């Protein structure tokens, strides 16, 4: 029997007692149990629905299988337990979990999440959130089968959450009408709800270390491949310095840098562990290539470089399985091979990769609707493609250097766009998209009923 939660949205009054109880009982940060609100602005065409959620203790928890530090275990009742003393604070589980359950504690640097109040469970007492709920909206449940209990908009991603949801579409729930009739404020709220875009401001600032880390590895791998293909293994110092810099930058991303060594403990199932192992291997390869040129055969150098690039991409593909991210020209493998094509013959390879990059850019035209940073990056990527060909056409050293600089700028912009376009399944976004769809349907119905087109 697996333990899980049953939540009745029709009974929830958004008092936040469950969140407070979780925090006080376990000494966790506020928001470990989240309260999501559907129609938070209380727009008159739809009703307010609350959803209290913490960890759903899934049957196939991706937080546990993907954790590079092996900081998660699963007990006999199916509860997914996080062990802070093992956590290095990489945050990869926050990408993998579609329910926003694991959260980094910014003060401590490691992950915190619901563990079913393990101490109370040993005494036969229900979790604090359940006992604190004044309306009985939240209850503990034991079942062998939690399948087919979730609404269509609820992200599952095949991990089988231990959760029953009821009352999400109760027609008897009360109507909520905003008391503020200020038309400007109402219009602003409606615009925010019906707008399909999401605010990406600050995303690159938050993930700057990952962006720099990947760009350094992409550059090092490209240099090693070009060197191996050309048969010139001298000058290997720069790739080694790039790889050493990438490792140093990666440590700054961790909440608990002193436990960085744990990153290689879960190679069997964690994409991030496999990435770190390959990055270390490529670092050693670049060092050997610098200290003992021609010691490592070129095919081995090329193979290690390509596998490292693939491991970088698989970290993101494992969390975001969308077609958009899998066909993105900013992925590490494509970017590095595209860079290699600039330096090798025949030139048709470079032309082919440029065409593929152009197709990817056209597919992502919606980036022009993003914030200012996203638009600048997108147009930099888009304009660099034709301008590079215009600059290399004259065939003189000055324009060739300018073309190379613009080529590198375009690839860098595309890699940064990759991070902006990387959007793993997320319950908050699912709720917003669902409400947007339902709200538009209701508005269309109202227009038809009133005779308006």
Image (tube, grey):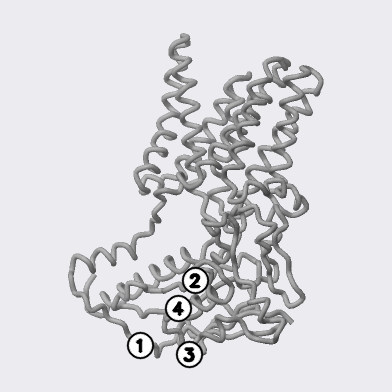
Q: Residue at x 49, y 71 (%)?
A: 34
Q: Earlier in the sequence, mark 3 or mark 1?
A: 3
Residue 99, compared with residue 91, is above or below; it is: below
Residue 318, compared with residue 79, is above or below; it is: above
Q: Secondary structure at mark 1?
A: loop
Q: Is residue 76 left or right of residue 148?
A: right
Residue 287, horizontal then vertical, whole percent = 73, 25
Residue marked by disc 1: 174
Residue 266 numbered tag: none
Q: Residues within 10 Å of mark 4 (few under 14, many from 20)?
A: some
Residue marked by disc 2: 34
**Nearer to me, 335 or 264:** 264
Q: Earlier in the sequence, mark 4 or mark 1?
A: 4
Q: How many marks?
A: 4
Residue 270, compared with residue 165, is above or below; it is: above
Q: Are marks 1 and 2 in contact (CB under 8 Å)?
A: no
As measured in the structure, the alpha-carbon distance from the residue carrying label 1 to the one carrying label 2 is 23 Å
Residue 257, compared with residue 307, is above or below; it is: below
Q: Residue at x 56, y 72 (%)?
A: 54
Residue marked by disc 3: 135
Q: Are marks 2 and 3 in contact (CB under 8 Å)?
A: no
Q: Earlier in the sequence, mark 4 or mark 3?
A: 4
The mark closer to the camera, 4 or 2, is 4
Q: Earlier in the sequence, mark 4 or mark 2?
A: 4
As measured in the structure, the alpha-carbon distance from the residue carrying label 2 to the one carrying label 3 is 17 Å
Q: Are marks 4 and 1 in contact (CB under 8 Å)?
A: no
Residue marked by disc 4: 16
């Amino acid at each position: 029997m697996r333990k899980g939660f049953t939540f009745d949205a029709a009974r929830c009054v958004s008092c936040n007692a469950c969140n407070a109880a979780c925090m006080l009982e376990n000494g966790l940060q506020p928001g470990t149990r989240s309260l999501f609100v559907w129609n938070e602005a209380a727009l008159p065409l739809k009703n307010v629905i609350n959803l209290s959620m913490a960890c759903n203790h899934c049957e196939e928890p991706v937080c546990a299988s993907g954790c590079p530090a092996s900081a998660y275990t699963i007990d006999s009742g199916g509860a997914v337990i996080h062990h802070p003393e093992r956590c290095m604070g990489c945050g990869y589980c926050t990408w993998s979990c579609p329910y926003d359950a694991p959260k980094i504690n910014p003060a401590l640097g490691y992950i915190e999440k619901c563990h079913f109040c393990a101490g109370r469970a040993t005494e036969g007492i229900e979790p604090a959130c359940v006992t604190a709920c004044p309306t009985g909206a939240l209850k503990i449940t034991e079942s062998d089968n939690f399948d087919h209990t979730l609404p269509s908009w609820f992200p599952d991603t095949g991990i089988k959450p231990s959760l029953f949801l009821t009352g999400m579409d109760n027609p008897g729930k009360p109507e909520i009408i905003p008391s503020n009739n200020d038309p400007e404020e109402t219009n602003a709220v409606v615009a925010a709800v019906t707008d399909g875009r999401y605010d990406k401001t600050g995303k690159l600032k938050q993930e700057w270390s990952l962006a720099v880390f990947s760009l350094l590895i992409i550059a090092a791998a490209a240099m090693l491949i070009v060197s191996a293909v050309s048969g010139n293994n001298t000058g290997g110092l720069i790739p080694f310095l790039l790889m050493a810099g990438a490792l140093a930058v990666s440590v700054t991303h961790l909440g608990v840098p002193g436990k960085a060594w744990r990153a290689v403990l879960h190679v069997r199932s964690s994409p991030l562990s496999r990435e770190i192992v390959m990055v270390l291997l490529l670092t050693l390869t670049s060092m050997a290539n610098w200290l003992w040129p021609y010691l490592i055969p070129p095919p081995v150098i090329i193979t290690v470089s390509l596998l490292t690039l693939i491991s970088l991409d698989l970290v993101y593909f494992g969390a975001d399985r969308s077609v958009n991210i899998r066909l993105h020209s900013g992925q590490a493998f494509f970017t590095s091979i595209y860079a290699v094509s600039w330096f090798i013959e025949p030139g048709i390879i470079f032309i082919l990769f440029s065409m593929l990059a152009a197709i990817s850019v056209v597919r992502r035209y919606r980036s022009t609707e993003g914030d200012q940073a996203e638009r600048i990056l997108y147009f930099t990527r888009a304009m660099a493609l034709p301008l590079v060909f215009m600059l290399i056409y004259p065939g003189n050293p000055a324009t060739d250097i300018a073309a190379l600089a613009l080529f590198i700028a375009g690839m860098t912009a595309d890699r940064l766009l990759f991070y902006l376009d990387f959007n793993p399944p997320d319950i908050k976004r699912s709720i917003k998209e669902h409400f947007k769809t339902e709200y538009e349907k209701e508005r269309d119905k109202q227009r038809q009923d009133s005779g308006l087109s």
